[in-house]
Amino acid sequence: MSTSPQHTVRVGDNLDVLATLTEPFDLIYLDPPYNTGGRVVQAYTDRFDDWTGFMAPRLVHLPRLLTEAGIVIASIDDREVHHLRVLLDDLLGAHNHVGTIVWDGSTINANHLLSVSHDYLVIYAKDLAAIKATGTRWRQERPDASTMLEAADSAWRAGHGNADEAQKRFRAWLLPRRAVLPRGLTEYDRIDENGSLYRVSDPGAPSEQASRSFRPLQHPVTGRDCPVPKRGWRMNDASMDRMLEEGRIEFGPDHTTQPKLKRMLKDNSTAVPRSVFRQEREGARHLARVEGAADFPFPKDVHVLARWFDTVAASDARILDPFLGSGTTLEVAMSLNASDGGARSVTGIALDEGSIIEDVLLPRIRHCEQNYQEPVTMSREAPRSPTVVA
């Protein structure tokens, strides 16, 4: 019988609590004060005369709290992103800066000169070179690819398993969408006898490729040899045999046509994450649906964080959130665990000011425990040095 992941919330000042932590974490998510100068909740304002002075003694714990393959993701906006980068460069090394993600949340802004709709996700690694040396590759689902696969599946069902009819229906669906879908995706416009959506590609080996084959392929109907690419096939004999067995080589009407390689969209439905993405903000609307939760301005989006947590960390990741706020990180970990059977665990640090614990965090914890059946243990630290966070 499997044990549910254990989540822990420590109520207190993160300046004090961080110093007591000893276990390393695979992912540290930071959602620090943005220093907006405005009021976050009635009890306090998000205003710092020395934001760097506030953050530095907290961030100093990051290096020792990261595993060797650990990742830091920090949410921030234009006000303090430059100061945050300097702090993290000093602590983790500029060479370990993976990149800065721009999230366009497209909210209405009241500024007169420029409507600022973006935030940043600043990403660092404990040891970027070591992560690259392992061959790790980050991938994310391509939403447009999922849409096309669903359309192809619908066409296959409507065509009653007839490949020609399914392909005709799919291309009719695709035609008005070619102008808006990425060109690389619209090339996938064929459906085979198994209902798989694919495109064909050149089978010839590039000039610099070492391993290749010059073995002729026999046409399945005429039994005669098909033309071999001038530089040979881009796969060796073993790979060619496997592709033939899997039906991933498409022959022409007869042996005079050179065979093509079939590239299945289902095998190419993920991509390396892009540094800019657009997704409407849903955090406040989502939190409003949590029974008993009070208003909390600008809670982080579950789907946005889930997208990046899932990208950079394993399904059994230990996650630290020193600025727990409304508890989004807890819900993200639980929702991901529910979707993939993972065992992510969260240690969060929550500041008990402005009734956030009672009015926002506790209702959300109850909501998550009820929906995901993963327990959260809370402990309260002795107050030492009161601070203000967003």
Image (cartoon, helix red, strand yellow):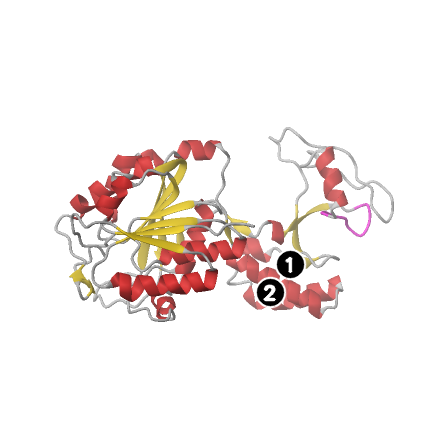
- Callout 2 secondary element: helix
Above or below, 57 relative to 389:
above
Mark 2 to mark 1: distance in Å?
8 Å
Q: Nearer the viewer, residue 125 or 319?
A: 319
Disc ID at residue 174: 2
Kindly indicate the quadrant of the structure image that contains residue 170: bottom right
Q: Nearer the viewer, residue 309 or 339?
A: 339
Kindly indicate the quadrant of the structure image that contains residue 129: top left
Q: Is residue 180 visible?
A: yes
Q: Residue at x 51, y 49 (%)?
A: 271
- Callout 1 secondary element: loop
**Residue type beneath disc 2:** Leu
Q: Nearer the viewer, residue 26 or 279?
A: 26
Q: Is residue 351 left or right of residue 73?
A: left
Q: Position of residue 340 (x, y in %)?
A: 53, 53
- The residue most toward the top is 210
| Label 2–label 1 contact, CB within 8 A | yes
Q: Position of residue 225 (x, y in %)?
A: 83, 40
Q: Position of residue 323 (x, y in %)?
A: 28, 52
Q: Which residues are magenta?
A: 248-256
Q: Residue at x 20, y 41 (%)?
A: 57
Specify the quadrant that holds the C terminus: bottom left
**Residue 43 on the magenta span:** no
Residue tagged 1:
189
